[in-house]
Image (spheres, grey):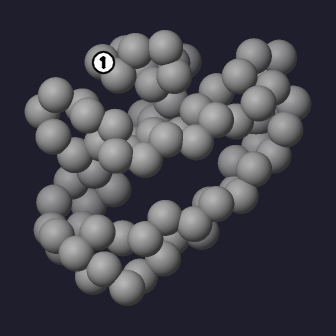
Amino acid sequence: MGENIILHVINNSKEIQHSVDFSQDERNSITFFKKVPAGNTIDFEWVVPAQKGAWKMGCFFTDPNEVHDGMVGTLIIE
């Protein structure tokens, strides 16, 4: 843990901007945020934290408590 890197490529083929966000606490405090402009593809690296737990990831661009278009998942670090 802590030295592993996750590489992401995200293609936003929609006509509106989206985002990719990672949060770990019950308040959904965003710890990583990257905009994905409409019609663009982005790539980025995210260093896996040196702590075990579940990370909520998704598109919370307008509100950290609301997922846009069902784009949400969980990353489990064991």
Mark 1 surroundings: few (<14), some (14-19) or many (≥20) residues within 10 A: few
Of 56 and 61, nearer the camera is 61
Q: Horizontal placement of 19 versus 65: left or right?
A: right
**Above or below 11: residue 38:** above
Q: Residue at x 31, y 80 (%)?
A: 2
| Quarter-of-image position of residue 29 | top left
Q: Percent from the top left, x then y, of residue 10?
A: 70, 48
Give the residue pinned by disc 1: 65
Residue drawn where x is 81% and y is 46% of the image = 41
Element under label 1? Answer: loop
Could you tell me residue 20's position as x and y percent?
Answer: 53, 40
As drawn, is 24 to the left or to the right of 17?
left
> Where residue 63 sits in the image (x, y, percent)?
40, 15
Quadrant in which the N terminus is drawn: bottom left
Asked if residue 22 lies left or right of residue 33, the reply is: left
Q: To which quarter of the image does residue 4 belong?
A: bottom left
Query: Residue 37: image x %, image y %?
Result: 76, 30
Q: Is residue 70 above or below residue 24?
A: above
